Amino acid sequence: MIFDDILLVTDVDGTLLTDDKRITEKNDAAIREFRENGGIFTIATGRGVTSARSVAEALELSTPAVLYNGAAIYDYMEGCFLWQSSLPAISREYIFQLMGRFPTLGVEILCGESVYVIRMNELEKEHLSFGRITPIRCCIDEVPPVNWIKALFVDEERIINEAVGYISAHGHPGVHLVRSGTIYYEMLPQGINKGSGVEMLRELIGARGRRVVAVGDFDNDIEMIRFADIGVAVAGALNQVIEAADLVVCDNNRHAIREVVDYIKAMRRQ
């Protein structure tokens, strides 16, 4: 079959989903065509288990998903983690530092399938509304002390810009920080990103021989795009994402995944 040596992985927000958080009919049809003709399809997202569930269900996702920006792989068919990494203990101190330096910063810690909100702000409330998330409001000392998958910081763009500059100036060994949106900044275990997550997924599902096609739009997609055999950026992606990509397709509101699948088909016919 035409796609039987391809693993297609796409970012969710800003790539697969339209700006109003829909999967277009053309994208849905393209994904079905891809899978029916031997392709393996999944998502790689910064979302956690709960907030990505609605997307997984809409896609009838049978392949495990790369979640938390590469920090975990979750099988929605079986309802379990296949693999996950954890932040080091020092991350607690780093979070305290950021909270002290930026007093309006929204902060959440993702642990297993739970979301612990350490500090709420209006943008954090809006973020939580995207998925079917029931957060646990608590102080940091009430979060279970092990298996922190990632921490998310949310604030207006100006504050996040300042937080990025602060982190760059001070350094935080043992963790990897990445921007996943204009108002989002994330703390992951060192060496963890979507690229490493897709590599782990390919091993876990026995698809090492498949070529990877990866699609994204933001900073947290760059390692995945570079790892892929064919890295794809959507129109409107950040300049650094476009520079890392082998191919640029239409934007997320105009059926980008349809264009990717059509590109693979055309490439095979040459």
Image: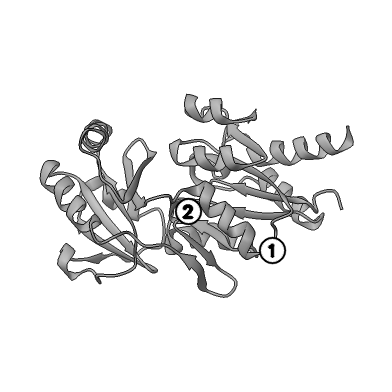
Identify which residue, 40 or 53, lies in the foreground: 40
Choose mark 1 or mark 2, whichever is in front. Answer: 1
Residue position marked by numbered label 1 in the rendering: 206
Q: Secondary structure at mark 2?
A: helix
Q: Secondary structure at mark 1?
A: loop
Q: Position of residue 47 (x, y in %)?
A: 43, 54
Question: Is tag 1's residue or tag 2's residue first in the polypeptide sequence?
Answer: 2
- Please tell me which residue is depicted at 23% across the width and 37% down the height of the picture: 163
Q: Position of residue 206 (x, y in %)?
A: 69, 63
Query: Going by the image, does 63 lie left or right of 194?
Result: right
Tell me which amino acid carries mark 1. Gly
Query: Going by the image, does 75 lie left or right of 123?
Result: right
Looking at the rendering, in which quadrant would you find the C terminus? top right
Q: Is residue 51 above or below residue 230?
A: below
- Please tell me which residue is depicted at 59% across the width and 63% down the height of the picture: 64
- Please tell me which residue is depicted at 12% across the width and 42% down the height of the picture: 101
Tell me which amino acid carries mark 2. Gly
Q: How many marks?
A: 2
Residue 255 visible in the current orientation: no
Q: Position of residue 196 (x, y in %)?
A: 52, 51
Q: CA distance from mark 1 to mark 2?
A: 18 Å
Report crowding for label 2: few under 14, some 14 to 19, many 20 or more residues within 10 A (C-alpha).
Answer: many
Which quarter of the figure has residue 203?
bottom right
Which quarter of the figure has residue 86?
bottom left
Q: Position of residue 193 (x, y in %)?
A: 46, 48
Residue 72 visible in the current orientation: yes
Report crowding for label 1: few under 14, some 14 to 19, many 20 or more residues within 10 A (C-alpha).
Answer: few
Q: Is residue 221 above or below residue 146?
A: above
Identify which residue, 193 or 181, lies in the foreground: 193
Question: In the current view of this chain or complex, which residue is farthest to the front?
Answer: 173
Residue position marked by numbered label 2 in the rendering: 70
The disc label shown at residue 123, or none: none
